[in-house]
Image: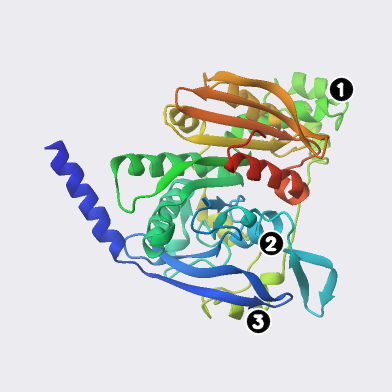
């Protein structure tokens, strides 16, 4: 009976996926750059049963060996930051040239540290309302963390059906910042489907977390201790906060005036902003094959009141998912900047050490060109393997602020080399 149920489930899933509402387009050139020396595809994939939610994506083929190199689905944080943010700011083949602005649009230049040198990279505008993704109904814009994971899972399945030649490539899922709350649940869901033999079959190997939010309480609460260790705040302020706030800097009682006063002084040191107007140029939209009339002005990160009001954060922690994944045969890479104040390495490292894994390679420096680039150690539990890496001088978005170091980590790890 169990075999019949499993077979029926696989059949239903297969029939559902064979009905694909997707579109794709090869982008030949982009304003500010010209003819592209790499293969870029954009498109939409409809998700949910009625496919009213249309997720926009960018797919960059590996510049080395597309049919053999790994496929990486890379998710962006926020929530609400677009795939274009990863494509232009983090690890894509192009980057903005801030020194040259042609009237209304900045010029682009090749990224010497693009991950597409060794990987096929798939970016998606998710959650709904991010970037060029849109809903055919107003209700479709109301979403949350859990539904976003379901949307991305549906998206990935349908994208693979539409791109069968990439189903045999080693497949990985990765992301940074707030996407850390998406990646482990998504990995769990993909892995379970992979082990059960659900269609489409894929060669699933592991996941990557970059300066990722893993537990909102632990990560945010670690900021104060980190600030004190880095002398970003005085010892006096740290000791005062610890005493007045009882060591809890998240659930602050507004009536605790001493704690509130200390926290206001601390908060003045915690700022991180970026901006991007490139995507609103009409010629850019035309070249990317964005559907006319589906979106108004877009931002690199959607922080509008409409998006914030429609989005519910309902996954505060993924520590249990990470613990569960240690029982699989997957590979995982977690890297973080040692100057990251948004998600301090203190909490990330403590979460890793709480997972009851065996230390297989002790703490050591890793190098680029003979210079220390950070530190690394490795853990394992049966067939599961985790590599933890810090990046010296790296802040919250390592691949933006320390692109060479990020590229070297990725190149080595995906090639099964020591970091």
> Residue at coordinates 41% horizontally, 63% vertically from top-left?
163
Res. 68 visible in picture: yes
Find numbered disc 3 in the image and state the secondary structure of the residue it sits on. Answer: helix
**In the visual, does 96 lie left or right of 204?**
right
> In the displayed structure, does residue 252 sit left or right of residue 236?
left
Percent of width and height locating residue 148: 46, 52
Q: Earlier in the sequence, mark 2 or mark 1?
A: 2
Please rate how many residues cluster around mark 3, counting C-alpha atoms within 10 Å: few if below 14, some from 14 to 19, many from 20: few
Task: Assign the N terminus to one quadrant of the image.
Answer: top left
Disc 2: which residue: 88
Question: Label 2 vs label 1: CA separation?
Answer: 39 Å
Q: Secondary structure at mark 2?
A: helix
The numbered mark at residue 283 is 3
| Figure quadrant of residue 358 | top right
Q: With respect to residue 331, does 48 lie above or below?
A: below
Residue sitting at x 77%, y 35%: 367
Closer to the N terminus: mark 3 or mark 2? 2
- Of badges 2 and 1, nearer the viewer stands 2
The residue drawn where x is 65% and y is 33% is 418
**Residue identifier under label 1:** 235
Quarter the C terminus occupies: top right
Q: Is residue 397 something one can see in this rendering? A: no
Give the answer, above or below, for where 338 lies relative to 130: above
Q: Secondary structure at mark 1?
A: helix
């Amino acid at each position: 009976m169990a075999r019949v149920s499993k077979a029926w489930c696989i059949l239903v899933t297969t029939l559902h996926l064979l009905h694909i509402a997707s579109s794709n387009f090869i982008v030949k050139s982009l304003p500010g750059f010209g003819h592209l020396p790499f293969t870029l595809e954009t498109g939409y994939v409809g998700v949910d049963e009625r496919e009213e939610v249309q997720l926009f994506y960018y797919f960059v083929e590996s510049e080395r060996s597309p049919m053999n190199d790994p496929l990486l689905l890379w998710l962006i944080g926020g929530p609400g930051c677009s795939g274009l943010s990863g494509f232009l700011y983090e690890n894509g083949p192009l980057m903005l040239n801030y020194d040259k602005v042609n009237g209304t649009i900045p010029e682009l230049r090749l990224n010497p540290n693009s991950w597409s040198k060794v990987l096929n990279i798939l970016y998606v505008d998710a959650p709904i309302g991010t970037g060029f993704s849109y809903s055919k109904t107003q209700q479709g814009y109301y979403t949350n963390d859990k539904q976003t994971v379901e949307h991305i899972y549906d998206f990935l399945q349908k994208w693979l059906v539409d791109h069968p030649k990439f189903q045999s490539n080693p497949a990985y899922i990765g992301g940074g910042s707030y996407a850390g709350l998406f990646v482990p649940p998504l990995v769990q869901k993909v892995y379970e489907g992979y082990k059960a033999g659900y269609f489409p079959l894929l060669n699933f190997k592991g996941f990557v977390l970059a300066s990722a939010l893993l537990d909102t309480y632990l990560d945010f609460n670690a900021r104060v201790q980190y600030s004190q260790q880095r002398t970003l705040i005085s010892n006096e302020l740290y000791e005062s906060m610890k005493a007045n706030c009882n060591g809890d800097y998240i659930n602050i009682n507004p009536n605790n005036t001493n704690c509130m006063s200390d926290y206001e002084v601390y908060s003045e040191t915690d700022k991180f902003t970026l901006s991007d107007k490139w995507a609103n140029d009409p010629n850019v939209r035309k070249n990317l094959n964005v559907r006319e009339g589906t979106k108004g002005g877009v931002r690199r990160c959607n922080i509008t009141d409409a998006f914030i009001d429609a989005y519910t954060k309902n996954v505060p922690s993924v520590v249990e998912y990470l613990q569960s994944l240690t029982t699989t045969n997957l590979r995982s890479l977690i890297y973080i900047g040692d100057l990251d104040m948004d998600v301090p390495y203190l909490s990330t490292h403590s979460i890793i050490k709480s997972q009851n894994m065996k230390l297989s390679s002790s703490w050591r420096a890793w190098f680029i060109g003979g210079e220390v680039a950070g530190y690394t150690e490795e853990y394992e539990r049966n067939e599961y393997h985790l590599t933890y890496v810090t990046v010296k001088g790296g802040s919250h978005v390592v691949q933006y602020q320390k692109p060479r170091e990020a590229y070297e980590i990725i190149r080595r790890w995906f090639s099964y080399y020591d970091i």
